[in-house]
Amino acid sequence: GMKVVDTVYTYGYSEDEVRHLAKRLKYNVKKLKLYIVCLPILGDGLMEIYDYKQFQQSFYKQIKKDIVVLGFARDKAGAQEIVLSLTQDLYDSDCNFDIKKFFGI
């Protein structure tokens, strides 16, 4: 499944759209056209970007742990903007790049 953090970063969506999409992600709705910024699925790195459609592949369906969504955007360029913004926010915080501490997870 997917877990969307409470302070999810977004790019190109209104507040109402964000609430609606966050719910749809939680329930793994199949037909969404967006890009996800998440914690690394296999544990290495700080964060990753995926086209949501990738999660329909059997490999991702076999993953037992929740995919932790940090942000989402309409396109890959928007997702890259989220990564830049989030990286700057991590740098400016006192979390020492501990992304789980930053999001309180």
Image: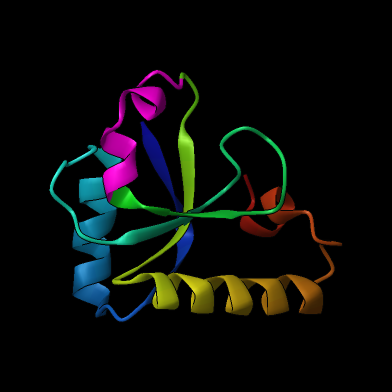
Q: Quadrant of the C terminus?
A: top right
Instruction: Specify whether residue 103 is painted magenta.
Output: no
Left or right, residue 49 beside residue 10:
right
In this rendering, would 77 be left or right of 92?
A: left
Q: Position of residue 99 (x, y in %)?
A: 70, 55
Q: Residue furthest left?
A: 31
Residue 62 included in the magenta stretch of the image:
yes
Q: Main secondary structure of the magenta part?
A: helix
Q: Residue at x 17, y 42 (%)?
A: 29
* Residue pictured at 36% horizontal, 31% vertical: 1
Q: Residue at x 26, y 35 (%)?
A: 56
Q: Which portion, as a residue range, is magenta?
A: 53-63
Q: Position of residue 22 (x, y in %)?
A: 29, 55
- Give percent across and percent down for residue 37: 48, 58
Quarter residue 58 falls in: top left
Image spot of residue 42 (x, y percent):
62, 32
Residue nearest the viewer, comparing 99 with 50: 50
Answer with left or right where residue 27 lies relative to residue 51.
left
Q: Is residue 12 above or below residue 27?
A: below
Q: Nearer the viewer, residue 11 or 33?
A: 33
